[in-house]
Each structure stands twice: as structure tokens, then as C-alpha cells.
Amino acid sequence: MSGTSSGNGLLHLNDVEAGLSKDNADLDHHLDPDAGASDPFDIAHTKNASPETLKRWRQAALVLNASRRFRYTLDLKKEEEKEQRKRMIRAHAQVIRAALLFKLAGENQIVSGAPVASPSAGDDYKIGLEQLASMTRDHKLSALEQYGGVKGLSGLLRTNLEKGIDEDEADLLNRRNAFGSNTYPRKKGRSFWMFLWEAWQDLTLIILIIAAAVSLGLGIKTEGLKEGWYDGGSIFFAVFLVILVTATSDYRQSLQFQNLNEEKRNIQLEVVRGGRTVKVSIYDLVVGDLVPLKIGDQVPADGVLIAGHSLAIDESSMTGESKIVHKNQNDPFLMSGCKVADGFGTMLVTGVGINTEWGLLMASISEDTGEETPLQVRLNGVATFIGIVGLSVAVSVLAILLARYFTGNTEDPNGATQFIKGRTKFDDAFNDVVKIFTIAVTIVVVAVPEGLPLAVTLTLAYSMRKMMADKALVRRLSACETMGSATTICSDKTGTLTLNEMTVVEAFVGKKKINPPAESSQLHLSVVSLLSEGVAQSTTGNVFVSKDGDDVEISGSPTEKAILSWAIELGMKFDAIRSESTILHVFPFNSEKKRGGVALRRSDAEVHIHWKGAAEIVLAACSGYLDSNGCLQSMNEDKEFFEAAIDEMAANCLRCIALAYRLCEQEKVPSNEESFDDWVLPEDNLVLLAIVGIKDPCRQGVKDAVKICTDAGVKVRMVTGDNIQTAQAIALECGILSSAQDVTEPTIIEGRVFRALTEKEREQVARKIMVMGRSSPNDKLLLVQALRKGGDVVAVTGDGTNDAPALHEADIGLSMGIQGTEVAKESSDIVILDDNFASVVKVVRWGRSVYANIQKFIQFQLTVNVAALVINVVAAISTGDVPLNSVQVLPFLVINEIWCFS
Ligand SMILES: Nc1ncnc2c1ncn2[C@@H]1O[C@H](COP(=O)(O)OP(=O)(O)OP(=O)(O)O)[C@@H](O)[C@H]1O
Ligand SMILES: [Ca+2]
């Protein structure tokens, strides 16, 4: 294989369907794409893709877009089954629950006649398992009130609503004994025998089995038991081998998927124990735990909401309706397995494991990923098609030979006519006919490509194993093959191209640049105090100071952590500041708005609104600023100064965040707490407090990875929520943009500009976009849609909830294992366990090796099959005998196959 076409490891499915691949491949080339620099399927070698290569890319694109539709139909079917299961379980659970309640009621009546739901004194806790479970599962607000609300309930569960439960083993064990642990029994996967049973139910194999039986019978009839079994026996052996290998491979794959599921479900999450935020496995959660929830999280157990702001839960995974439910004191019940769609809050765990509906659901469905990939389906089709062609050819040959024989047109080796009506004995005629049958059977056997489906199975299993070794967790098998034909990768910036380890390195307070950024001696006390107030109250993070006061632990998102630790260095006393004011209402940060706000009442009764968010957006809402001496200045022409400051920080790859605040007139504050929820926090006439520049360094190896992709014909684009200048700087640093001259629209574009285009324009522009800044989650989605419409096979990488829609829409979604939110992971096909963009390249490579391997195998197998078929047919018709029999061809094919993929 030479030059440009060699780097293209794609299978031309159109050719395959025609029966033969025209490409003249190096047949015995080793299959390992890592085999060395000379490997034609090493994607780094597709330099300067020729038009020919590009044409093939497009072919694959078309084919694979079709496969996506396929994937969806599959999903739908599965979803339907899941739904039915759910309904069944719910009905079941109701029955079990009803029976239990009935029993309980009976016992209570005998003992005391007390009402069913009253707290009965347990051994350790003043509330029993069944009471808790029935309250949470049925969302009984009245029961919660009966226990004294969340506060009363926490008392019954012996949980401190601030500090959580103690972190001591005895207490945890106690809780596990009383209320169970957050695990559920696993449904066993299918056994090996099931796979064996399924493996033979394949049309090509059935044709072969019948052929084998016929061949065995005829063989024994003509040549006797001792020698006559060779042909039939060898076909049986080959079939058996194929079945065995298929079943073994499928079985191993299913075991692997079971392990993957284990890994996938073992979510690490933060809980508050002993006043600290600690990371534990979801399985270690106990009743009474306090769990902070934020956007993108999965609710890890059943529970009630203690406090939260704008908390919205997507309950579709449990109820089946895709509806976002807002949670507050009137509807505080949280169901395990649901996702947090917006806002944040803290929940008190009241039900775990099998006592939750999610647990029941999980225990009753076995997640068998017995999915057939599009390639498998297609090649099954090809194999069946060829099998049928072989069969029809054989039948035709049979008809021709029989007709010739019975019309007396065949001669035996001595030149005598074989069949003369009325003279040839029945026995002789019968033997001759049997011989003709044997020829037909041989033709069938030689023509059937029985190994073709198996080749796909084996090569998929192989590349999946390799991907796993390269830190990519494959959630959907079809992703293995689709990834090989990706033509573009849309990557988010934060967390994928960069490390997501953030530190504040520059800060402006007023027009003064603070250097070093946390040098508070240059600032007036009132400024520091206002800044601290804003930072401490408008955060989803937390600060824990150890008893001796030296160690400070900060939790939260990387951005929050950076700002918190900067403020602490400035002198912020987190707990003290937080106790000086009470939060009235929160507008949580989200990626759509790119800012978050909080309204708080201070001890002097003043109401402050603090805003924190994307620098240029917050700055635009400011009409004044506080200088470093604490004097209020009006913005006017100084705005340009700040804009220039932001641009300069952004050009140095920094992520800019602005902090601002304003006073709120008392009469504008809602008078009763109920209406806080509808309160739109004022965000005009703000006073700028500070602008900080946060450094988030590029990951090592990203530049090389981007280059490898580009060389291989895979375009890397960056789609980020961050400032366009920051995006540009990072894109230059990691090689997505090659030079500063590239930076004109639409190569680099803002989300809002792209959004405003018509669908047609978007489609045209999309191909040129290399960097998109300040994009909303929907812009990411629009870009992916536009690219796919233009014929690209799009891979999307992302970690945040803001990436989820795009991840879902993409041909292949890749999420990040460490920083990725549950929602992002759920929407993806592959989870990159080490969060590194470089691993994405390896996935592309293994994906391509799938195509390369199958291409080679098909070329080999079909060449042999077709050649043997043609030779046999020609020979059978001209000489009445076949030169190639099954004993010669079959073992050869099977051995080649097993050698190829083991
Ligand atoms: N916790 C936060 N509080 C206030 N502002 C924030 C916070 N986190 C991020 N921002 C600001 O909002 C902007 C957009 O964030 P968003 O979550 O949309 O994307 P991102 O994480 O920066 O980038 P990417 O899409 O590449 O992952 C950031 O650039 C930053 O200026
Ligand atoms: Ca991100």
C-alpha cells in the first residue's frame, strides 16, 4: 500500500456490498496499528490528504450518519423495554409495600392501636426504616411535618444539619444496620451457554450445518463409514469452531461490559461529614448523610431537601416524563437516580439502596450491552447475501448437472454415456445423482463466508480492549467503529485542553493592578470587606478550617476554588463573613448566563446584591467602580480602561472574572419569603469591585495530539464558554490556530454571532469555524448539528453539563472521567478516564484499526470465496467434478481468522 491512500483505514462498504473490495491490500500485514511507523493505518501518516482520500472520508461519513439513525432506533427499543420494566417494578413495589403496611397495621393494632405512620422507637433511631421509606417514596409531605419537618427528621436521624454525621466507623455501621447500605444486588449476566446457543442461529451457519449433514450422509453412502465422513466432518468442525469462538468472544465482551458498568456506577461524590466535605463512593452513603448537590449531579439516594436555591431536578430517568421539577420546601423530596438540571442545594439522605425505587430498578435490570453495531449488521447482511448467492449458484449447477445427466449428455471416464433411460440400473443412477449432489454441496460450502460476522465481533472486541488499556471507557460498542471515521472533533476548552487547575494570577481593584494579586496592604479595609462578602456568599464552594486554624481546605468547582483561595489570601474569614449576613435569594451561576448573583441582608439591615461572572458581561452592567481606597467612582470613560485590561489578561490566556455589587432599596425587596423565588435580582447600575485573571494552563501533550489529528485529516475545533480572546490565546498555544493571521471571522467567532445566523448560513460557516468563544450550551449544539448536516462525522469532547446537549447530538460523544459531571458522562459514548485530550487521539486510532482489520479480512476471505466458487462452478459444469473441496478450503479460512484476531 502506498502514499496517501494508505493512511486511510476505512472500509468501503459500498464495495463490500458489491462483493469485493477493489483495493489491493497488503494481506498479511500485521493488524496492530501500533506496529510501527511503517504501519499504513497509523493515522499520523495521512499527510496532505489527497482528493481521493477525502472522497473516501465522505463515503464513510454518509455511511456512518446512517448508522447513527440506526443507533437511535436501537435505543428507542431499549428505552421502551426499560419503561415497561419500570412500570412493572413500580407495580411490584406498590404490592410489596401494601402488604408490608398491612402487616404493620395489624401488628400496631394488636400492640397499641397507634397510627401507622407514627415514629416507633427503634433500637438506635427514633424512626424506622419503613416509615422513612414510605414517606420518601410516596412524597408524603404530611408525614414529614408530623416528624417536625426537616429539622425534626434530622433529630430523629441524629444528623447535625450543619456538620452532617460524624465520620466514625461505629456510627456508619449502626446506620447501615438500621437502614441498609446504598448497594443493590446485581442481576446476573447471561451464561456462556446462552451465548453458545445464540451463536449458531445465523443463516450462513445454518446453511453450513445442513450442508455438513447432507455431505456426511452422502459421503458415508458413497465411500463407506471409514472414509466417507471426512468432508462432512470437516465442515462440522469448522462450524463448531466458528460457533465456539463467537460465543467465547461475546461472552468475554459481556463480562467486560459488566465490569464497565460497575465502574460507571461507582460514582465518587462529596458529602458533609463532621463539618468537612469529604469524597466518598456512592456505595458508602448512609441514611442521615448530608449531600451537597449542584448542577449536573446525579441524586445519589432518596432524600429530602434541606436548603437550596433554584434547585431543579430532571426526573425523567425515574418517571419517564421529561419534565424539570423545581424543588423547595413545598416539594422537598428527591428521588435517587434523577439529575440536577439547575441550581444547588443540600439534601438529607433518608433512603438508600434497595429501599429506593432506583435501587429496585437497578437490581432488576441487567445492563446487557448485547448491541450489534452498524458494521456488524451490515456485514451480517453481506455474509447472508453471499451465502444466498452461493446457494442459488449451487442449485443452478445442480439443475444443470442433473438435466445433463438425465438427458444422457454426460459421459463417464471411459467415454460411455452415463445414463441411458431404461437401461441404467436404479442403483447406479442413484449413486451418480448422489455424486452430483455432493458437488453442489461443495459449491455451497466453499462460497459461504461463515467467518465474516465473526471477524467483526473479534476485531471490535480487540479494539475495545485496546481502548480500555488506553484509558477510554467504552460505553457503547458502536462508538469503537464510528470513532475511526470521525472527520472533526469539537472540543471544549476548560478541563479538556486545559488542566482545570486554576489560580488567580492577576487582579485589578479599581484601576489599580494588585501585585502580587493577593497583596491586601494596597487596599482599603472597606474594599476588602465588600470583596470578602461577595466572594464568601456568592459561591457554591466551601471552606473548612481545621481546629488549630492552620489548614484550610477549599471545595467547589476549580473556578470557585481559585477565587476563594485568592480571597482567603486577601484576608477573608469565611465563616465569620458568612455569619454577618443572611442570604435572601440566589441566582445560581449557569453556563447560559455566565454569571451568578446573590442577595443578602447584612446585620445593619442593608440589602446587597453581589454579582460574579464573565468579566466583560459583568463590566457592561457596571456604572461605577470602587477604587482601591474605597471611594466610589463613576465609570464613564474608565470603562475603556477596564476593557483593555480584560483584553490584555485574556490575550495572556487568562480567564477573567469580574465581581460587582449594588445596594438594593428596601422597598424593592419582596416582603414575604414566598415571593423570593420569583424575584429577579437587579443587575443594572452595578459597582465594580474587582477583576481577576485566572490561569488555567494548557495540558501537556495537547499540542502534539492536535497535530496528529490534523495530519490525519481530523479537524480539531474549540468550542468554549470562555472569553473569545482567552479562547484564541489557548487555541494558538495548543495549535488549533496556526498563526495569529488566522484570527478573522468566521475562523474565530462568538457564540452569539453564530446563533444569529440562519440555518443555511450556519451550515456554510460551520466548516470554517476553528474557535467559538462565549458559546452557550445551545450554540455548541447548533455547531454540531450544522457540521453533521455538512457531512462531517463529528466527535465532541466535553466535561460540563453545558456540553451535554452537544455530546448527545454528536456521532461520538466523549466525556471526561475525572472532572466530568454525571450528566455529561451519561450523554457520552466513551468516557476518557484521564481527562486528557491526547487519549482522544488513541481512540481515533483504535477506531480506525477496526476498519483496517475488517477491510483486510474481507479482502482475504472474499477473494478466496469468490475464486473458489468460480473455479468450482466452471469445473463442475465443464468436467462434472470440483477441484476444490471443503476439506481444502474451510480449515484454511478458519485458521486464518483465528490467527488474525487472537
Ligand atoms: N463559578 C463561576 N462563577 C462565576 N463565573 C464563572 C464561574 N465559572 C465560570 N464563570 C465564568 O463564566 C464563563 C463561562 O463558563 P462556562 O461554564 O460556560 O464555560 P467554561 O467552563 O469556561 O468553558 P468550556 O466550555 O470550555 O468548558 C467563564 O469563562 C467564566 O468567565
Ligand atoms: Ca468544560
Image (cartoon, grey):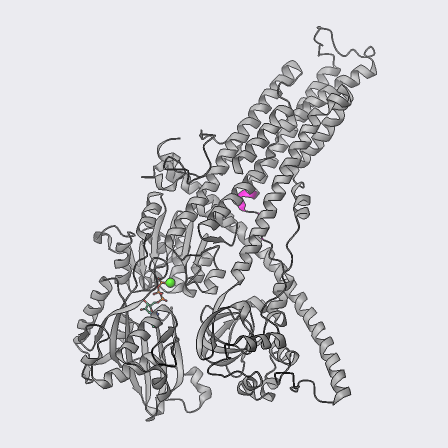
Horizontal relation, residue 611 to residue 674: left or right: left
Mostly what secondary structure, the magenta segment? Answer: loop
Whether 724 is drawn above or below 582: the answer is: above
**Residue 567 visible, this angle:** yes
In the image, the segment drawn in magenta is 369-376
Horizontal relation, residue 225 to residue 349: left or right: right
Residue 343 in the image: state x and y as whole percent: 44, 75
Nearer-the-camera pick, 571 or 220: 571
Residue 289 in the image: state x and y as whole percent: 52, 77
Q: Is residue 729 magenta?
A: no
Residue 283 in the image: state x and y as whole percent: 55, 67
Nearer-the-camera pick, 542 or 553: 553
Residue 888 in the image: state x and y as whole percent: 62, 23
Residue drawn at (45%, 48%), measured in percent from left and top? 483
The N terminus sits in image quarter: top left
The C terminus sits in image quarter: top right
Tag count:
0
Q: Which quarter is ligand 1 in?
A: bottom left
Q: In the rendered image, which quarter is residue 620 located in?
A: bottom left
**Residue 627 visible, this angle:** no
Whether 452 is drawn above or below 540: the answer is: above
Nearer-the-camera pick, 854 or 350: 350
